[in-house]
Image: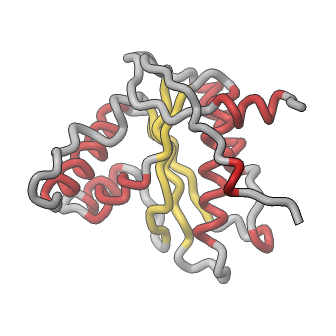
Amino acid sequence: MTNPTLATIAERFSCRGYEDKKIEIEKLTAIARAGLQSPSAKNLQPWRIIVIKDKEVVDKIDAAATSRINANLPAGQEPRKNIFFDAPAVFLILKDTNAQSNWVDIDCGIVTQNIALAAHSMGVDNVIVAMASHAFLSDEAEALKKRLDWPAGFDFGMAVACGYGNTKKEPHEIDWDKMSFV
């Protein structure tokens, strides 16, 4: 049994290489809308989505995160080259630190999944990047937050790097041992 939604879920993969091609504003807007339409506990919607389509800003966040990650690597571990894999756009999902909810992280995870699936359904490849949090813990954090017009009372939740992939891979294999019927 399948339908377009199930096909999108089955086909999506984490893309780690992108063409030097901007995503159309109509697609970015539709993807953001899908994130904003996410359900949340008590419909509090404890998030803010920042769509970064300025490649220079994407690259600055990437460099700040990568530098901090590499500075703290265990001995012998290979340094990272980047975290966004040259994606031309990034969706930052911020979480409201003042929300009266125990479910803010889960709500932001739902937004992240909606963004990733909506993007894939429109031919926009993507990868979910938790490591972007390092940029907002780095020495460059305040300058980056200022450039992004980061609202007070919000922390990093998740990032989704998006673009037109120049690499393809098979989605992960399903492990049916991880589910059961009762």
- Residue located at (67% from left, 38% from top): 117
Nearer to the camera, 29 or 87? 87
What is the quadrant of the N terminus in the image? top right
Q: How is the image coloured?
A: secondary structure
Q: Compared with residue 139, is residue 89 higher up or lower down, i.e. above or below? A: above
- Residue located at (55% from left, 26% from top): 170
- Residue located at (49% from left, 55% from top): 158
**Residue 137 percent across, percent down from the top left:** 28, 65
**Residue 101 percent across, percent down from the top left:** 67, 80
Which residue is outermost to the left? 75
Residue 14 is left or right of residue 110, and the answer is: left
**Residue 173 percent across, percent down from the top left:** 60, 38
Q: Compared with residue 65, is residue 43 higher up or lower down, i.e. above or below? A: below
**Residue 120 percent across, percent down from the top left:** 63, 30
Nearer to the camera, 124 or 170? 170
Q: Compared with residue 38, is residue 80 higher up or lower down, i.e. above or below? A: above
Which residue is outermost to the front? 177
> Which of the 4 quarters of the picture holds residue 182?
bottom right
> Which of the 4 quarters of the picture holds residue 17?
top left
Q: Compared with residue 19, is residue 170 higher up or lower down, i.e. above or below? A: below
How many discs mark residues in the rendered view?
A: 0
- Residue located at (34% from left, 50% from top): 147
Nearer to the camera, 113 or 142? 113
Residue 54 is left or right of residue 50, and the answer is: left
